[in-house]
Image (cartoon, rainbow, N blue to C red):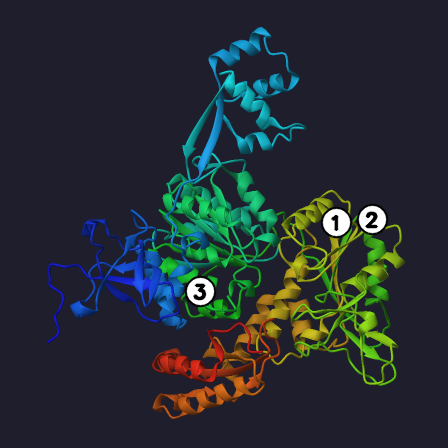
Amino acid sequence: MTKTLPDSRMCISVAVFAPLRTTFSYLPPESEAPEKLFIGQRVWVPFGRGFRVGVVTSTNCEATPYIKLKKIAELLDTQNLLTTEIIELAEWASKYYHHPIGETLSHAFPASLRKRKKIQAPVNIDWTITGLGREALESGKLKGKRQIELMSQLASFSSMNANDFNKLNWNFSWRSVMKNLTQKNFILQRKSHSYLRVAYHNAKSGKRVSLNSEQAGALEKIQKQFDGYSVKVLYGVTGSGKTEVYMDLIACLLSEGKQSLVLVPEVTLTEQIVQRFKTRFQGSVGVLHSQCKDSEKLEVWNGCRTGKLSVLIGTRSAIWVPMKSLGAIVVDEEHDVSYKQQDGLAYSGRDLAIKRAQIENIPVVLGSATPSLETIANISSGRYEEIPINRRAKALPEPVRELVDMSKSGRDGGLGKKLIEAIDHHVSVGGQVILFLNRRGYAPLMMCRHCGTHQICTSCERHLVYHKVSNALVCHHCGKKMSLEKATNCCKSQNLFEIGIGTEQVEEKVSLLFPKLRVGRVDRDSVKNPKDLQELFRKIANREIDILIGTQMVAKGLDFSGITLVGIIDTDSRLFSVDYKSEERLAQLLTQVAGRCGRGTGQSKVLIQSRQPDNFVLNKIIHDGYRSYSSVALKERERLGMPPFSALALIKADSSIKKGADQFLICLREKLMKNSNAVQVFVSYPITAFFSPKRVKYRSLMVMQCKRRVLLQGLLSEHISWIEALGRKMRVRWILDVDPEDTL
């Protein structure tokens, strides 16, 4: 007979940090009182033959057979680290994206807390001058020049820490001098424990820019009915000053003692917005992104959790950060594909922001000059409220847009005659130029003149791109490099020639055409880290660069008054993609790139080169703008039954065997088609992926589509365990992507 859990005993539900789709029940630890257990607390639990870190999701779960329950081995925290709202968000994401709950919850913790490590405040040291030290300084008893410099600096402040001293850039080792002064009792050294190494204080609003009438009107509309859940879309043209509206909104929240979360696509590309926030809100702004050190992530994460940080700016992962008194969420450039996680838990940062706002009963603001078609559809249905800004912040006119027909015109390094003349004119009158080409390297394809063989990567069978700077062939897919001398083809000839153009080739040609001008290039090859990008921004702002050549990195985060001409070198490569979102992304990219110019005084212009002058998308964007294009595009999506008028799910299968991924998906398709609910669900045959990660040798895809989301979700929920078992049996790694950003 099975013995059941007595009513007097607590049963604890724990989500273990492992790829498992259920929580597990445990008894409280032997030596701890039940009242020391909290929802959102990390615990160390016996699991299988070892132990795992987990998080408490319930302290009053349904009783299970007593003999199957084990006791929690250790409480890793003395308090809850996650709020109930974050746990609810993780549970929703786990169900919606069909991802293990333990792995989903692990996203809410910094890497250092996903292990058996208790949260410990780092030791901070600060120094203050003593009365004896001040007397020695004033009386002239100090003889050493370095001692006098340090003591004089310290006398000006109540206290200073290591960060304060390092910022002063001493030309000597100040720590050794400080140690000597401490031994003489001239300086008092104090140790303290704090999660924030920087002396944060309550954020105060610094100097603000006065809003124009449209910005002020938009702010007023956002703040109307701002005391509960709502989704407001700040639909403003490029250069309309959306950031200033965000900051005024946050300033109002700060005055009420509330925190704000601002999501940005890529922090490294939005350095300007981060600096503007830090200038405006002096003291309590945290930044979180993938390039932060683990210690920095922990510091910011805990600062938000405890309420010491009032404003958090971060990429999509910041949506998981617990905040003590969150008042609103802002999603800047909500259309950007960077908000979508592509591996593991394939979540959308924007969609989770909306769900979190709903759970916490707070407003969320989506901002963009080119909102996604899904967002525009939600505006049309009344689910979201549109807040338009139809003119630029400084009352400047929109740049003139012109489509240049290249079908009957030659080009020199990608540059047509009209664009070359425009560059010469704009620079001669003091303007700066951006040349956009979303293709790095020198040439995207190398071909043998004798046999016509293309140079292919031996690892992933993709075309190798020629990089002239390093004189090498590089695979942009897996990163493999090959010297040009080792290139092989069927006739063993070394007579190779380039096909197509990349940013390196454009830079070379521009430097030859305009030898006296200063040329810069921004792509993954020239910009390795945020410091490189900051230095580039500095040069542009100081007019040390006349012509900037770049990939899509120039479409984000650039706000400089000197740019009067934008040249888009090649648009045709994006016109004929099989992905259903390719036209939408092209329209967004053209609008965003064009918006980089005309932010100062003077006439501005955008030249778009194409061999398809009659293309509908290009003409619609150039002549009528993005708003008009989106209206037509939505009607076409509805006619074809594509999202947002249907739901999609994409299954990616990876295998080391050539046919392994295909066989897995074929078996899965046969299983799904036997289900009665599958009658209303379209399930495609497997197709070979156009792109796949470096570690994957063979990847195949299968698309599932249904007009009713609930039917698609139900079908996936019913078969998810079977899919897992099939993957293990066939040794295939698979990823389920609900609401995919692309289907290639």
Q: Under tag 2, what secondary structure?
A: loop
Which kind of residue does numbered mark 3 sit on? Answer: Asp
Q: If you read the primary sequence from the N terminus, does the residue marked by circle 3 or circle 1 appear first?
A: 3
Q: Residue at x 59, y 32 (%)?
A: 166
Q: Which label sits on residue 351? A: 3
* Label 2 – label 1 distance at C-alpha: 10 Å
Which quadrant: the C terminus? bottom right
Q: Amino acid at mark 2?
A: Val
Of badges 3 and 1, the one in the foreground is 3
- At x 59%, y 8%, the residue is 141
Q: Which residue in the structure is indicated by mark 2?
A: 429
Q: Is residue 157 left or right of residue 7?
A: right
For the residues labelled 3 and 1, the Cα–Cα distance comes to 40 Å
> Mark number for residue 602?
1
Say which quarter of the image contains residue 423: bottom right
- The residue type indicated by label 1 comes to Gly
Residue 512 in which image quadrant: bottom right
60 left or right of 567? left
Q: Is residue 277 left or right of residue 99?
A: right
Q: Are marks 2 and 1 in contact (CB under 8 Å)?
A: yes
Cα distance in 3D space between marks 2 and 3: 46 Å
Q: Which mark is residue 41?
A: none
Quarter residue 493 falls in: bottom right
Q: Nearer the viewer, mark 2 or mark 1?
A: 2
Q: Is residue 547 left or right of residue 94?
A: right
Q: Secondary structure at mark 3?
A: helix
